[in-house]
């Protein structure tokens, strides 16, 4: 097993912009990843399953809702700390980060923002501690980029609701204890419902055969006349804007996370370029390899600057959906390109699991698609700057 | 049990080392500092384990300027109850020992723990001097420590095996590998560290006994000479006459 020699790269001395607490949060997350995750990630990727035994450790380092207030079991940290944790997790594996993103931004965030006080008290402390795992059901078999067209629906049956429909591509669904499900009421308005495992008619079949995000479990949510208690409806917000605001929070974390994957690829490629000799010198001494490495660190540095500024705006509550889209799209695309170049620098070794590159590259193919595809984010920016919607 | 743990900072192990002021000072520009690993992994964590098992308190003490605060906060995040920083630059092992002794004197610590050395200067002086200045017993390079009643039982790794020694509290012990496992600060700890007390005290004003007059880096490693497997004679010749190792 390869030892994890990763060390961050900070070409523009961005660390000077971080607080001591940010750095401590990062140091702890990185140390935890190196101790608990790096030694096992390849094995779990190969087995195509999430290492559930690390969930308590993830909770310890603040991977579940670090920005949720302390009264609900969160850490009350700022948005930059959240980003830093996502980056350290995705530096290891996008699947690990996905589990954390879903729990934090797609499950805890809506319960915190749109839930009743009873719902917050009932679910948030357990979710923060990793005693309960959640998933987020928005995408349907026939409604991916166009979630507003969803057909999953619920009807008022007096003292409860009756939920019908199916969700697809749901991260964590096979083992989640609860699902935040978005469905239309009889008037066609979208609401969030908390569905618990064990409710009659609710099943979560796993999706097999993924070549990407293998260390994260993905599945369906199937609702066959599921009786959902009325107190499980999120009362605070309805309409498509409710789930989309959760996506804003998750996409923000992905913007940070993707830099982590890119840094890991760059870090490995830079080290390899110094160690591997051909034609009597290290391959890093050849101009063609230097071009790749120099371009990688340039793109990583640009993404770091973009994302740090976004973090400041997010802390001030000023980051717009379109600004978050730009960072998510740019950074994931950047990470994919870095992974592809890094793969080439490693030569044949780059295709093996001796190095993390292929795994990152395959993972990033999901990351570039979920939480708004690469194309859809461009449409969001296009809409924002022209005022013309090109979605339909 | 009242435990005092001495904590100092050290450059991260991946730091590129260089010097300033005519090679008399280590260049701290852009250097990432960490808690000296022997202080953190062994002294502090063992101190916390003893407190958790038997009650009491763990205080950390650091001689240094405010640039030491980040590593002190980390020690608090790992679990120390409170911290003291003696506000003066550490100059040599003696000034550090003297300042800590002046602070700790009369405060009734049962156990004073510190790392066996720092990973930058590797002087291994502070523990012995501190014990002497305070008139306390001292055990160095301990790999295991237990306390029962008023007696500390300490295991040390010695060349051929292990040695077990006992000493009465209060006692000073320098800690080495084996004492405890690394503890990663968790989110609760990081949050709690925000409000734990970090007291800054003025120094007693100890003067150094020695000063560094010059630092230099080790010489670059020489070229590798490849010798054909068939040609053992030439290898022996080179080991004799060039490397002069046999
Ligand atoms: C591993 C994984 C985990 C996931 N986890 C979750 C989860 O936890 N919860 C959840 O709800 N969803 C999840 N998803 C679903 C994900 O959000 C969707 O896959 C994504 O929104 C795209 O939807 P789709 O796959 O149906 O693609 P489609 O929407 O069918 O898109 C296919 C292609 O058409 C393009 N396209 C679509 N509309 C337009 C347009 N108007 N203009 C131009 N091009 C367009 C897209 O960019 C894409 O290239 C996950 C997906 C994956 C792969």
Image (cartoon, helix red, strand yellow):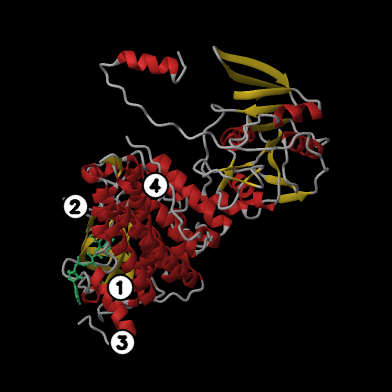
Instruction: Please give left or right for residue B11 compared with residue B64 in the image.
Output: left
How far separated are the C-alphas under marks 3 and 1? 46 Å
How far separated are the C-alphas under marks 4 and 3? 44 Å
Q: Earlier in the sequence, mark 3 or mark 1?
A: 1
Residue A210 numbered tag: 2
Can you give x and y, in whole percent of width and height, for residue A275 in the image?
34, 40
Q: Earlier in the sequence, mark 2 or mark 1?
A: 1
**For discs 2 and 1, the disc positioned in front in the rendered view:** 2
- As rendered, which of A245 and A374 lies closer to the eye? A374
Residue found at the very far bottom of the displayed protein: A387
Residue A158 numbered tag: 1
The chain ID associated with circle 2 is A
Q: Tag count in the figure? A: 4
Instruction: Please give left or right for residue A129 compared with residue B71 in the image.
Output: left
Q: Quadrant of the N terminus of chain B?
A: top right
Q: Which residue is mark 3?
A: A386
Are discs 3 and 2 less than 8 Å apart at CB?
no
Residue A55 numbered tag: 4
**For discs 3 and 2, the disc positioned in front in the rendered view:** 3
Q: Quadrant of the C terminus of chain B?
A: top left
For the question of whether residue A347 can be seen, the reply is: yes
- Check disc 4 and report its element: helix, strand or loop: helix
**For discs 4 and 2, the disc positioned in front in the rendered view:** 2
Q: Residue at x 44, y 60 (%)?
A: A83
- Badge 1 crowding class, 10 Å Cα cut-off, few under 14, some 14 to 19, many 20 or more, is few
Q: Quadrant of ligand 1?
A: bottom left
Are discs 3 and 1 less than 8 Å apart at CB?
no
- Badge 2 crowding class, 10 Å Cα cut-off, few under 14, some 14 to 19, many 20 or more, is some
Are discs 4 and 1 less than 8 Å apart at CB?
no
Q: Earlier in the sequence, mark 4 or mark 3?
A: 4
């Amino acid at each position: 097993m390869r030892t994890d020699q990763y060390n961050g790269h900070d070409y523009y001395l961005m660390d000077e912009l971080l607080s001591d607490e940010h750095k401590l949060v990062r140091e702890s997350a990185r140390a935890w990843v190196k101790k608990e995750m790096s030694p096992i990630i390849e094995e779990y990727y190969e087995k195509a399953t999430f290492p559930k035994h690390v969930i308590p450790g993830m909770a310890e380092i603040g991977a579940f809702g670090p920005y949720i207030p302390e009264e609900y079991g969160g850490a009350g940290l700022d948005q930059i700390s959240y980003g830093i944790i996502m980056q350290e997790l995705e530096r290891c594996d996008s699947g690990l980060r996905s589990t954390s993103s879903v729990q934090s931004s797609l499950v805890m965030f809506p319960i915190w923002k749109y839930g009743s006080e009873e719902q917050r008290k009932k679910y948030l402390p357990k979710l923060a501690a990793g005693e309960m795992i959640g998933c987020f059901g928005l995408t349907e078999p026939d409604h991916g980029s166009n979630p507003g067209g969803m057909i999953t629906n619920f009807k008022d049956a007096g003292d409860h609701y009756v939920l019908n429909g199916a969700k697809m591509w749901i991260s964590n669904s096979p083992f989640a204890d609860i699902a935040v499900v978005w469905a239309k009421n009889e008037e066609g308005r979208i609401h969030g419902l908390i569905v618990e495992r064990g409710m009659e008619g609710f099943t979560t079949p796993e999706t097999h055969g993924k070549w990407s995000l293998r260390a994260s479990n993905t599945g369906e949510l199937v609702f066959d006349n599921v009786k959902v208690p009325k107190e499980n409806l999120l009362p605070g917000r309805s309409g498509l804007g409710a789930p989309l605001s959760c996506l804003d929070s998750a996409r923000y974390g992905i913007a940070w996370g993707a830099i982590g994957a890119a840094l890991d690829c760059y870090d490995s490629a830079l080290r390899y370029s110094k160690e591997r000799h051909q034609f009597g010198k290290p391959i890093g001494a050849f101009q063609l390899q230097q071009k790749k490495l120099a371009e990688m660190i340039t793109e990583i540095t640009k993404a770091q600057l973009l994302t740090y500024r976004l973090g400041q705006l997010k802390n001030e509550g000023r980051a717009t959906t379109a600004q978050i889209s730009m960072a998510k799209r740019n950074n994931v695309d950047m990470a994919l390109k870095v992974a592809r170049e890094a793969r080439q620098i490693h030569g044949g070794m780059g295709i093996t699991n001796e190095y993390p590159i292929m795994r990152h590259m395959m993972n990033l193919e999901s990351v570039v698609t979920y939480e708004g595809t690469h194309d859809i984010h461009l449409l969001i920016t296009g809409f924002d700057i022209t005022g013309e919607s090109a979605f339909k | 049990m009242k435990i005092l743990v001495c904590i100092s900072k050290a450059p991260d192990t991946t730091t590129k080392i260089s010097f300033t002021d005519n090679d008399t000072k280590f260049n701290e520009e852009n250097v990432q500092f960490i808690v000296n690993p022997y202080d953190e992994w062994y002294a502090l964590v063992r101190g916390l384990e003893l407190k958790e098992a038997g009650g009491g308190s763990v205080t950390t003490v650091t001689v240094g300027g405010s640039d030491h605060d980040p590593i002190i906060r980390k020690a608090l995040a790992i679990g120390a109850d409170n911290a003291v920083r003696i506000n003066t630059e550490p100059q040599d092992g003696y000034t550090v020992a003297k300042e800590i002794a002046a602070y700790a004197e009369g405060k009734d610590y049962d156990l004073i723990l510190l790392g066996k050395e720092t990973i930058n200067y590797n002087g291994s002086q502070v523990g012995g001097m501190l014990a002497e200045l305070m008139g306390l017993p001292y055990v160095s390079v301990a790999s295991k420590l237990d306390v029962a009643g008023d007696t500390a039982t300490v295991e040390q790794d010695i060349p051929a095996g292990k040695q077990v020694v006992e000493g009465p509290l209060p006692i000073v012990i320098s800690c080495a590998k084996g004492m405890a496992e690394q503890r990663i600060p968790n989110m609760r700890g990081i949050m709690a560290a925000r409000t734990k007390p970090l007291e800054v005290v003025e120094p007693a004003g100890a003067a150094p006994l020695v000063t560094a007059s010059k630092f230099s880096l080790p010489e670059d490693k020489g070229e590798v000479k490849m010798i054909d497997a068939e040609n053992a004679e030439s290898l022996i010749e080179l080991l004799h006459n060039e490397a002069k190792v046999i």
